[in-house]
Image (spheres, rainbow, N blue to C red):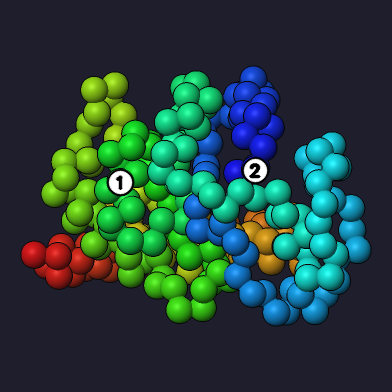
Amino acid sequence: MNSDRSRTKKIISHAKERGVKALFITVDAPQLGRREKDMRTKFEGTASSQQDTGKDKFRRDQGAARAISSFIDPSLNWADLADLISAADGMKVVLKGVQCWEDAVMAAEYGCDGIVLSNHGGRQLDGAPSPISMLPSVVQALTRGGHLGPRADGTKFEIMVDGGVRRATDVLKAVAMGATAVGIGRPMIYAMSTYGQEGVEKLFEILKVGPSVPSAGSITLMIRKSSK
């Protein structure tokens, strides 16, 4: 979220005009964590196009992440969602970085279309819970509040899990526990940056090779029993 809200709305409008279907709002990094490894690598590249256009000031002595994110507005709060949903003008609005069931319920109550359970890859707070560990309490709270049933427009509130997904069994577990979908970050980055297309193809092969049907049934049954 840019501190200059007019620029944020312009970017949203630009995305919608080009067919983007959803707006993901990152809420777990209003201020970057102390990324010491990143800080040791001084930023020598060019700024983002948005920073260049807006002539933003940014520091080059604390790593790339801090340099290219200097425009982030730390004051973003629940009251801003109405304007963002209005600016999205029909695009789905999803909060990325939810880390407790209370915020999941509030996201549904404020009109969001879904959430992404994520701890920002563990790069914000080293003691943050893993996304999969948050999932049961989030599903239970949203179910109690009646937020997981069909809405008036036929859509459903979606729960995505981002982090720790390395193979098909991880996907299966998340979906069996109530997730709509999972996010895949580091595996895709590592595969692409190291081996290119061949690496990405191998990654998808790993993700497709899941357990046998009996094993899948056992995992689902085990999760259902544990949730009672």
Pointer 1 residue: 106
Quadrant of the rendering where the N terminus is positioned: top right
Looking at marks 2 and 1 on the same chain, the residue that comes earlier in the sequence is marked by 2
Q: Residue 112 at what x, y percent from top left?
A: 38, 37
> Foreground residue, 219 or 32?
32
Q: Residue 82 at what x, y percent from top left?
A: 42, 31
Amino acid type, label 2: Ser
Question: Dot 1 lies on which element?
Answer: helix
Residue 102, picture quadrant: bottom left
> Foreground residue, 96 or 33?
33
Q: Residue 7 at what x, y percent from top left?
A: 69, 32
Q: Which label is found at residue 5?
A: none
Pointer 2 residue: 3
Q: Is residue 63 left or right of residue 171?
A: right
Q: How far is the residue under mark 2 from the one under mark 1?
A: 23 Å
Q: Depth-wise, is mark 2 or mark 1 nearer the camera?
A: 2
Residue 220, picture quadrant: bottom left
Above or below 213: residue 94: above
Amino acid type, label 1: Met
